[in-house]
Amino acid sequence: MSVNDVAADPAAPSPVEFGLRLKQAQHLLGLRVDDALRPLGLNLGLWGVLREVARTPGASASELGRASFHTPQTVGGLLQRLQEHGLVERSSGRGRIVENRLTPRGAELLRQATAAAGDAIRVPLAGVDAAHTAQASRFLSEFISAMTSLPEGE
């Protein structure tokens, strides 16, 4: 099934209803993950930046922002909080760019947070047929690809 097949099926929701369902799922998932991360002193935004720092050591705030769905300014504030808690080291790098790296403490907290987030996601997924989960994952990948290939303004 392709993204275009949704419009061809008369039983399919309207594009607006579909978009709102995606947003509702994203919102509910975010709340669950935030609840799971709170006991560790993190939230979804902090965890996302920690994940990206681990994935791309030495990345700038701008690079981390693109990867974690935040503006560079927001990431700068999140990085400052992570640094204050000893989870990230920030140092001068290429030109005026500040490079960011996980500390050992940050790496350990990231491991714990990722496990907690995984559990928070796994619980509701347990009530969904595995074939549906796989199909939804393929669809979302296709939808994201379609969205990112659109020209600006479309």
Image (spheres, grey):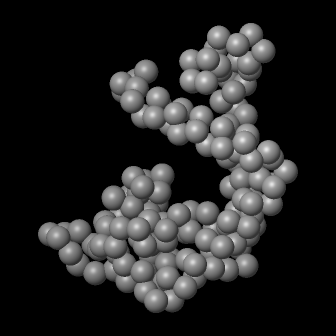
Whether residue 17 is visible here, answered yes or no, is: yes
Residue at 49 percent across and 71 percent down: it is: 50
Residue 3 coordinates in the image, percent (x, y): 57, 24
The front one of 85 and 110 is 110
Place residue 38 in its image quadrant.
bottom right
**Quarter of the image that includes the N terminus:** top right
Residue 96 coordinates in the image, percent (x, y): 19, 69
The front one of 143 and 53 is 143
- Residue extending farthest to the front is 131
Q: Would you place residue 45 above or below residue 146 in this image?
A: below
Residue at 72 percent across and 42 percent down: it is: 131
Residue 150 coordinates in the image, percent (x, y): 40, 26
Q: How many marks?
A: 0
- Residue extending farthest to the right is 127
* Image side of residue 23 versus residue 81, left or right: right
**Quarter of the image that includes the C terminus:** top left
Q: Would you place residue 134 above or below residue 32 in this image?
A: above
Residue at 14 percent across and 69 percent down: it is: 95
Residue 33 coordinates in the image, percent (x, y): 70, 62
Residue at 43 percent across and 73 percent down: it is: 54
* Image side of residue 69 versus residue 122, left or right: left
Place residue 90 in its image quadrant.
bottom left
Q: Would you place residue 42 above or below residue 5 in this image?
A: below
Whether residue 84 is visible here, answered yes or no, is: no
